[in-house]
Image (spheres, rainbow, N blue to C red):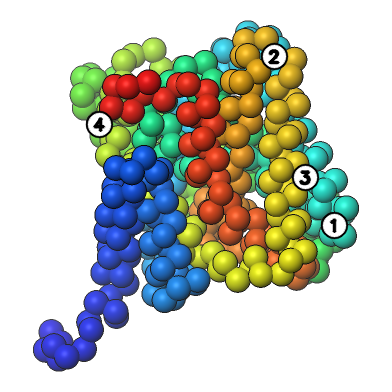
């Protein structure tokens, strides 16, 4: 035991630093919530103060030590996204489901074209565009939970999060194979890379089926009551995440499919959401704290990069709104609200999950700087815009009041 009490020992304890950051994020967030400011901004402020923009106490080496903890938090979030993806509704809803699918593709086309207009190579533009199809599940889920949002618009937004992630994964496999075979650190040919990326998706799907099968068999074998099944399900999720981690399979696809299977294949009642709501809420804060800590706001210092990032944000929201035009289930105001609620972005790490802290280095320097600026802007703007969209839709019921 170190008895040198004059040394700030907590500075040398990664666990204490992370715990202190989480404590600060929760205290600031709960204080802001009383002022009707989204609680997630507590994680933003704590991350900026303790991360790359501020004191540098929370950095990549520190977070790498807690990779499995962060992956477990991501697993809960992604499983919840899958659990809210209603395949039957998407297939039978006609124009509504079709408009959500078109919106994902419209985002890809609009963002890719915008990036190319700003001078990025087409390969990098396609790669970044495929990532930015996906809507950030942490931001949407956190805002919906905080505001107790429910209604037709919120339901569609929840389905869009899962759908956009699936489409992004499929396109990312193609663009990642192209970038890795033609980018600045190219190795191998396109066919080999495409087969490798496709194999990760297939393996992730197989692991999901296996893990769900283990859960279903275990619950039926011991005739587990509904109150005990969440523990068995959590164990199955950890098995899924662990198998994906050691096999380099697509953890995002696998965890999404676990949620989709529980929603669409499991016919018994489950109380997973109710029993683990607190853990999920803490997971939202922890993951966004990590994102904010790794953001350096100085990346927004170059005028053209800030302009390009703002343009991508605006074009993406506009593409969402135009794609929702043919849908008849939502009025004009609700469509505006949904476009704002779907504005948030994910990073490359957010789509591969098991390498959350590993930035992809296959892009040229300018493209990497622009992607960093987009994520910095996302931390600042997306929670507020998502919150505003939910409020605009008239589907928030915080404290029992509409």
Separation of marks 3 and 4 at Cα, in angstroms: 39 Å
Q: Which residue is mark 2?
A: 327
Query: Where in the figure is residue 165, as x and y percent of width and height?
Result: 61, 37
- Residue named by callout 1: 118
Q: Quadrant of the C terminus?
A: top left
Which residue, given by chain and number where applicable, does mark 3 sit on? 111
Q: Using a 10 Å C-alpha cutoff, classify the residue at mark 1 as few (fewer than 14 neighbours), some (14 to 19) or many (20 or more).
A: some
Q: Are marks 3 and 2 in contact (CB under 8 Å)?
A: no
Asked if marks 1 and 4 touch (Cβ < 8 Å), the reply is no
Q: Secondary structure at mark 2?
A: loop
Q: CA distance from mark 3 to mark 1?
A: 11 Å
Mark closest to the chain's N terminus, 1 or 4 = 1
For residue 340, what is the image quadrant? Answer: top right
Q: Earlier in the sequence, mark 1 or mark 2?
A: 1
Mark 3 vs mark 2, CA separation in Å: 22 Å
Q: Considering the image in quadrants, where does the N terminus appear? A: bottom left
The residue to which callout 4 is attached is: 275
- For the residues labelled 1 and 4, the Cα–Cα distance comes to 48 Å
Q: Residue at x 74, y 57 (%)?
A: 307
Q: Is residue 56 left or right of residue 125?
A: left
Q: Is residue 171 left or right of residue 26?
A: right
Of 198 and 117, the residue lying toward us: 117
- Would you identify the image quadrant in which residue 98 lies? top right
Q: Earlier in the sequence, mark 3 or mark 1?
A: 3
Seen in the picture, residue 345 relative to 256 is either above or below; the reply is below
- Asked if the residue under mark 1 is in contact with the one under mark 3, i.e. CB atoms within 8 Å, the reply is no
């Amino acid at each position: 035991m170190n008895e040198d009490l004059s040394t700030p020992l907590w500075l040398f304890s990664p666990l204490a630093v992370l715990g202190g950051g989480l404590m600060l994020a929760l205290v600031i967030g709960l204080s802001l919530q009383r002022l009707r400011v989204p609680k997630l901004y507590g994680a933003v402020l704590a991350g900026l103060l303790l991360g790359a923009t501020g004191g540098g106490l929370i950095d990549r080496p520190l977070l790498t030590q807690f990779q499995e903890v962060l992956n477990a938090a991501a697993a809960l979030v992604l499983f919840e996204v899958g659990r809210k993806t209603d395949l039957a509704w998407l297939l039978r809803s006609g124009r509504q489901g079709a408009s959500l699918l078109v919106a994902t593709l419209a985002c890809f086309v609009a963002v890719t074209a915008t990036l190319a207009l700003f001078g990025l190579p087409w390969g990098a533009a396609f790669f970044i565009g495929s990532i930015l199809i996906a809507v950030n599940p942490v931001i949407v889920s956190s805002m919906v939970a905080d505001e107790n949002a429910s209604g037709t618009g919120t339901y569609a937004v929840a389905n869009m999060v899962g759908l956009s992630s699936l489409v992004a994964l499929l396109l990312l496999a193609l663009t990642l194979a192209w970038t890795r075979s033609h980018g600045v650190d190219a190795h191998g040919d396109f066919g080999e890379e495409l087969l490798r990326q496709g194999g990760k998706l297939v393996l992730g799907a197989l692991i999901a089926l296996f893990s769900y099968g283990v859960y279903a068999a275990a619950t039926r074998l011991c005739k587990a009551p509904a109150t005990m099944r969440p523990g068995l399900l959590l164990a199955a999720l950890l098995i899924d995440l662990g198998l994906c981690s050691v096999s380099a399979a697509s953890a995002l696809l696998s965890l999404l499919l676990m949620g989709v299977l529980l929603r669409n294949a499991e016919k018994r009642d489950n109380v997973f959401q109710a029993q683990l709501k607190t853990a999920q809420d803490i997971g939202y804060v922890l993951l966004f704290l990590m994102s904010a800590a790794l953001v350096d706001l100085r990346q927004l210092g170059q005028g053209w990069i800030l302009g390009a990032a703002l343009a991508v944000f605006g074009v993406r929201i506009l593409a969402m709104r135009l794609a929702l035009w043919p849908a008849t289930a939502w009025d004009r105001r609700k469509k505006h609200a949904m476009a704002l609620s779907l504005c948030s972005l994910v990073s490359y790490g957010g789509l591969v999950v098991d390498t959350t802290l590993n930035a992809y280095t296959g892009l040229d320097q300018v493209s990497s700087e622009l992607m960093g600026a987009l994520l910095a802007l996302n931390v600042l703007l997306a929670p507020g815009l998502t919150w505003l969209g939910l409020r605009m839709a008239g589907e928030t019921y915080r404290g029992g009041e509409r």
